Amino acid sequence: MKLADEDGPGLDTADSCIGARLEAVAFDISLDASPQPVEPAPADFEEFYTAKVDVVVAALTLSCADSEVTDAAVTAALTKSSQRWNHLVNHPNPAGWVVQAGLAHAEKALRDHAPAGINRATGGYERGLSLDLAFATLPLLQRAALITGYYLEWSDAFTAAGFETPLSTVRTRRERAISFIGHHLRLDEAEVIPLVRSHLQELSERDQPAPPAMAVVRRSGRRRTVANRIAAGLAVATLIVTGGALFQAGDRVQVAATPEVVEGPSTSAKWFGPVSDGQGAFVALNTSGASRFVGSKDGTEWIKLTTWNSRAIDLRADVSSFERTGGRYVTVIETPSRYDAFVPPFVATSDDLRNWNVRQTDVGEPRRVEGLRSRFDVVANAASGGHVLVALEGSDQLDYRSFDLRADQVCVESVTPLRREYFLCDGKTIVIATPDGDELAGTTYFRSTGTGPFVEIQLPVDAVARSIVGFAGGFAVVDSNLGHVWVSTDGEAWQRATSSATANRFVLIEGGDSEGSGALVIEPDATGWRSQVVSPSGLGAAGSIPLKVEPAGVWSQPDLASGPAGWALFVTTSRPWERTGSIPGWAVVAGEWIVSQLPETATITAQSTESSTTLRFVTDSEWAQVDDDGTIVLVDPRTGSVLVEVTQEDIDQARPESLGTSRVKAQVLFSPDGVSWRSVWTSTEDAWSGSVAVGDNEVLVSGTQLTGGPITIQLDG
């Protein structure tokens, strides 16, 4: 069925909606921001409904690929617009306002009921998704930005007016969407836009659901208006009693006499946390615009705490992390990778979320190597007493522009600490090496005391930068070589606290939440998973964790957290190759090489276990061929000889059978003292990653494939 509207071309709709949320690097692209032709304002809601309902339905259906979500979003948006018609009657783009209301409803529904198995791991770092999959993988609002610009033909200004959002936000969403699709299709922006227009036109040729009757919308609007007034009164009355008590004393955040109920944290990249506030409640940070902190007693209902304008620190910088460590909140503000100019990261600490001590690290500019874009990123920070430790890791990426290249022109990338080689698909080679033989990237550590500046310090040799934690009595860090744990009272003088039974990648540490609690160390050994409390004064109690999983069965590092109630450990056994798709993922050990491919990507990685060498191959090139029987042959581009062969049988055998008879994919274990442990939550659905936070009587699980917002686990249940 074809629909026409004055604001844009004919619209049809798709009958499905995928809610994966992935971000990509933004390039400088934009649409013509010329004013949209002004239409006469509808005299009433009935006139607006008659003129624009097909546009609203079509825009939401093209944005979403789940028919139930689309129907609910359309009904909710139209109902809301009927309630607020007095506000919309003179609105510059009422249809846009209704579309954004429907998108907000759809986004929440997709977040709350996200299906397992959706691929969220490719991001902008791996290539190979088809156009339809790349479009479906985009965040909902980025898909909508493509639809308003390339299908409805709305200008950026007209879309921004309808969505009641800054013009820059509209442009950024569209830029990121085009960049993401271009990354996967290996095409420039100018080549991507016509394909997107054609794809949207193809989607529009499908049938669309019928809109709800206008009379039904009006009745629903009147009922919701009455219900909302009653609910708002009850919520305010309840929160005046409970919310005021929740955040009113000691180090807790002060709130207004009438707390404002807000939407809680989700899996969006704009949310950080939740984290324990140290006294039983939870705090999360939203960085959409000004940094907004929200709090909750148990993770079920959230109220606004305070707003902090972190952008005032430097307009080129964004918040990149937020956590509570050693009794303090620590926020990192860094320059995104899209900027060429180097700005040393800022670190801000606070006791109450209102008063912040902001300091800039004194790291020098990264080494300038011709052909590379180098930067420093904060990979860990920890606080204890009056000290704050920060770890900065250097990274290097090929500067394609300096060689007048596109990413899709590189077929093989070889990386060692001292040398990078890029083998182009046309047979040419680019070699980048440091002139003095030093490694291209490294780690730098800084410490600040009191309100003083950050000063560079040294940590134990082989310290894992990302493992640094703080607790009331000091700091702890893991030795990457043997798995030993080192502790320090001030972050400068270190002593070894434990001797790992076996070197492994799963030595976990986390600072205790209360005074004198020390840090908790968790590691698997020959007898199972064990825990040990450590502090600068020596070893504390030890315990055994009822986790019947071999370390090899755990794909991603578990998450360990502490709070007033004790310690929580999140473990997942989900693996990339268990995800469904036209290109399945796999990992094979072949001699000295670990060869792997992530799902839905056209890149194969070979990493040497005997040298610090990593090669990344684009499939179907002269250096990465797939035979008719499924055998993958990787050729060393430096010598022309076969590097490794991986057969289909190798891949099949490398996919382990289910671990025992258990169907559990993820679980949370809890201990009140770091010694005695019990399982408090399990999931049989795939969960690729997750984090936990501990309150007085509950644990919050967030960031998993299972849900958009945190899962509340009652500990007395």
Image (cartoon, helix red, strand yellow):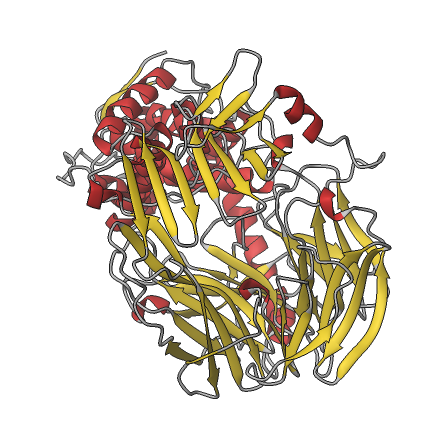
Residue shown at 36% from the left, 60% from the top: 437
Question: Which image quarter is the N terminus in?
Answer: top left
Q: Does residue 152 appear in the picture of this structure?
A: no
Seen in the picture, residue 571 relative to 94 is either above or below; the reply is below
| Residue 66 at x, y percent in the picture | 52, 26
- The quarter of the displayed image where residue 534 is located: bottom right
- 127 sits left or right of 648 in the view: left
Residue shown at 42% from the left, 14% from the top: 207
Query: Relative to the observer, which residue lies in front, 209 or 496?
Result: 496
Residue shown at 54% from the left, 37% from the top: 110
| Residue 252 at x, y percent in the picture | 58, 77
- 75 sits left or right of 172 in the view: right
Seen in the picture, residue 528 relative to 141 is either above or below; the reply is below
Count numbered badges in the picture. 0
Q: Does residue 456 appear in the picture of this structure?
A: yes
Seen in the picture, residue 621 relative to 452 is either above or below; the reply is above
- 144 sits left or right of 658 in the view: left
| Residue 522 at x, y percent in the picture | 74, 62
Residue shown at 57% from the left, 47% from the top: 610
- The quarter of the displayed image where residue 671 is located: bottom right
